[in-house]
Amino acid sequence: MPCLNVRRVIWGLVPCGYAWGMSDTVLHVRSLGQRWQTIDPFLFCVHHIDRYPKGNEQCGPAASLAGRDIRQDFAGLDGWRMYHGDVVPGFPQHPHRGFETVTIVRSGYIDHSDSLGAAARFGKGDVQWLTAGAGVVHSEMFPLLDREGPNTLELFQIWLNLPSKDKLVDPYFTMFWDRDVPRGVFTDARGARVDVTIVAGALDGITPPAPPPHSWASKPESDVAIWSITLERGASWMVPPAKDARTMRTLNFFAGASLRVDDQLVTGPSAVQVQADQPVRIEAVDAPAEILMLQGRPIGEPVAQYGPFVMSTDDELQRAFADYRRTQFGGWPWKENAPVHARDAGRFAKHADGRVERVEEMGSPDPISLTEGR
């Protein structure tokens, strides 16, 4: 998904707006905005929830588009957005270079098409991990497949930086189908349940699929972890420590009334940076709570970003624009700027090397039950 703002970051700086020095383990707290500010090695994260109505014959919304700023519809009228789409919501073709996207779809579907000729439809718990590397153009459209509705879409998209030496690797994507994404269930001393979906970073011996080969997350020393944590009302869990104090860890509390993080009470959607090498207890105080935990050891290099290009220097950024104008990162092989796959295509991935994956529609795998021993 494109990012249109200019950003310059020098590694090690904490985004503005944090409250400092909260406790021994809680370092900073800030409100979550529409685009979540993140800390190296992450670039940013967005959380989309769109409650789309039933779909029409074109897999777009069976509803009037009057009053919307078509191709720039971010207002959320009636609880949903067309984004840059005009028939089907989503993001028509746009380029990326120099970083990765990790897209976690909790409900609904995404249709992916790209300049390498690859395509996919994924959703219902699936994850796509895309290394843009030297450059790729792709589209991300949100087909509304249910003609009776509703077609709720909920997703996270996380931008993860690449080290300078890997910014020009070949583009690549891998799919973590819902059936392959491990989930752990912890029960606290009172019998309350905590569910952890593990996208990256092992937890108590539970290991997720491997990230792409050139990802920062593929390096053991990176200590990258992406966990989606759901706590029942009143449930508590001790988040285990990271490898060491060089790792940065943020608990993005995005759903729930209040969350206790050790001795700190956090109310409302908040990014809570904690001391990564220390265990930290979290508790859903007044209602169920949900957290997206992002952690990793900083890459520690300058970042030069303009919109969809993330490089290390301004010269590299200018070269990215020149290369895109000259090559279009391989060109666009699709007839439409916003391809939507057949309604009955199912969940699949066709890779640039010709490999095809297809997914049987079935339930999520059984979670692994673990009793908290801390």
Image (cartoon, rainbow, N blue to C red):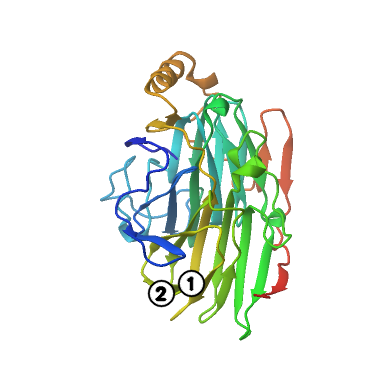
Amino acid at circle 2: Ser
Q: Is residue 254 visible?
A: yes
Compared to residue 136, the image places residue 152 above or below, namely below
Q: Position of residue 42 (x, y in %)?
A: 48, 44
Amino acid at circle 1: Ala
Q: Position of residue 19 (x, y in %)?
A: 32, 60
Name the quarter where the C terminus is drawn.
bottom right
Question: Foreground residue, 155 or 342?
Answer: 155
Which residue shows up at 60% across the image and 73% down it? 194
Q: Position of residue 321 (x, y in %)?
A: 40, 20
Q: Is residue 107 visible?
A: no
Q: Going from the N terminus, do you reach mark 1 or mark 2 first?
A: 2
Which residue shows up at 42% across the image and 54% down it? 62
Q: For label 1, count other residues whose C-alpha is less than 10 Å away and answer few (under 14), some (14-19) or many (20+).
A: many
Q: Are marks 1 and 2 in contact (CB under 8 Å)?
A: yes
Left or right: 303, with 222 as reference point: left
Which residue shows up at 54% across the image and 24% down it? 134
Compared to residue 208, the image places residue 269 above or below, namely below
Left or right: 348, with 278 as reference point: right
Mark 2, residue position: 258
Q: CA distance from mark 1 to mark 2?
A: 8 Å
Left or right: 356, with 145 as reference point: right
Q: Position of residue 203 (x, y in %)?
A: 67, 60
Question: Foreground residue, 13 or 357?
Answer: 13
Mark 1, residue position: 289
